[in-house]
Image: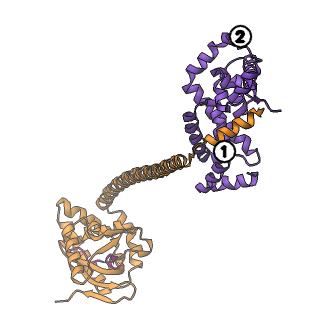
Chain colours: A purple, B orange
Amino acid sequence: MTEAAFDACIKKILEHDKSGLKEIYDAYLDYIYRIVYGVVGRKEDAEDITSEFFIKFWQQADKYKSGSGHKGYMATMARNMAIDHIRKYKKEVLESFSKDEDEITVTEPVSDDDTEAEVLENIGIKEAIQMLSEDQQMVVNMKVLAQMTFAEISQSLNVPMGTVTWRYREAIKKLRRYGYYEGA
Amino acid sequence: MKELEIEYTKQISLETPDLWSRIEAGIDEYEVKRKQNEVVSETEVKEEKTDTIKIQKRNRTIIYLRNTVMAAAALLLAVGVFKMVGGVKNTTMDAATDNSISYSAEAPAQADTAPAYEETAQEAECEEEAAIEAADDTSDSYRSDSKETFTAAPAESAGDSFIVTEPDTLKQSISLAQIMDCDVTIATGMIETLNDAGIKEPYCFEANNTEETREFNNKSKVEGASEKAVKIFFKDMTDETLYYMICTKGSDTDIEIKAVYRADTDELIYELKKE
């Protein structure tokens, strides 16, 4: 969606015309849902937060400043909502994530077995991700789906950035075994 | 090999549910609440305005009452002062009557202003002379006072003793009964006569010669006093018509209205019928 088209939608929203929001919804639902899912990591939570995002966007449409890059604006807003959610409702998860830092040192040996590699390459991306540890999944989701930087991930999860990057690298190594490589 | 980001993004997009119905429901709920809040806010603003108006009205009422009370107090004070001054004047007048100085001094001037009613004046002159003689013979205090009053009057003024209240110097209307306060009975009779003549609310004026009018009334009590005439301007307060009446002493306890005229046309309204 172009900036002009987005601005037109904002104008409709400000006139309490729901068609403006529907256009934005149709164009960016996948994008927003992916970002939110990347942060919260659970389908049910992602659905709730995505719904809340669009409702909040309707309520606060007057705060959007035209020409500021609507896609980045929406991504930031969605990420912040998702991060707020995990801070509120996933405090336990974050705490366990922090406590598991010792486990970081425990790495799984990457097998060089060609037979095993052929089998693993047939695994779908979802299954491959689920093969990662919960901490690694979280970092990969945030990095790949939510398009967050390591610094943002570090800040969101309240863990050192070195730990975050290390976990990400370990996850990528594992995923490579399943036939998935990190793009440029 | 598959690119992680493309594959993962594609997979999540495939799993993206349709959330529009939930979102729409949430928006509708929000809009309903917003409109309710607006109504409540408007109501609150209206209530605030109403309260402000009530307070302003109350303040105005308080100010009005305060001013009214102050005005009433000032009026009462003025009336009190007026009465006190009037009392002093009466006392002065009584003293002047006792000494017969003021009347004798004013008599020539009054005579110049009264060319009419010559017959009455001549009769008054004779009666006054008789009264002087009679007064000399009597010795009671009342008559003694009166005697001094009339004996002090010069002979030439007695013939033209026509006292005129001056409408040009009028300050405020005053009841005839008030002017004739030296003898209410007399005043009441006069008012009845005027009422019979069709003048409903005869009000005379407090002119600068009010005391003279009173003096005339005092004289009217005197037995055998000369029949001085007085021309008194007054208004009928029902229609603000200005009249004047010619009055003379009727008897010992009464004065008579000889005639009543409209001041603007000199139209005769009432005339005492001669028997």
Marks 1 and 2, Cα distance to the nearest angstrom?
A: 45 Å
For the point 74% across and 32% down, the residue is B4
Q: Where residue B112 sits in the image (x, y, percent)?
A: 42, 78
Q: Height in image: B22 above or below B237? A: above
Q: Secondary structure at mark 2?
A: loop
| Left or right placement of residue A17 versus residue B142 in this view | right
For the C terminus of chain B, which image quadrant? Answer: bottom left
The magenta stretch is B223-239
Q: Quadrant of residue A117?
A: top right
- Residue A105, which numbered label? 2
**B90 and B113: which one is in front?**
B90
Q: Chain of mark 1?
A: A
Image label count? 2
| Left or right placement of residue B159 versus residue A182 in this view | left
Q: Chain of mark 2?
A: A
Q: Where residue B257 sits in the image (x, y, percent)?
A: 25, 80
Q: Read off the residue under disc 1.
A: A63
Q: Quadrant of residue A4?
A: bottom right
Query: Of the residues tagged 1 and 2, which is closer to the observer?
Result: 2
Q: Amino acid at mark 2?
A: Thr
Residue lying at the far front of the rendered structure: A115
Q: Quadrant of residue B185?
A: bottom left
Mark found first going from the N terminus, 1 or 2: 1
Say few, some or many: other residues with alpha carbon within 10 Å of mark 2 (under 14 / 14 to 19 / 20 or more).
Answer: few
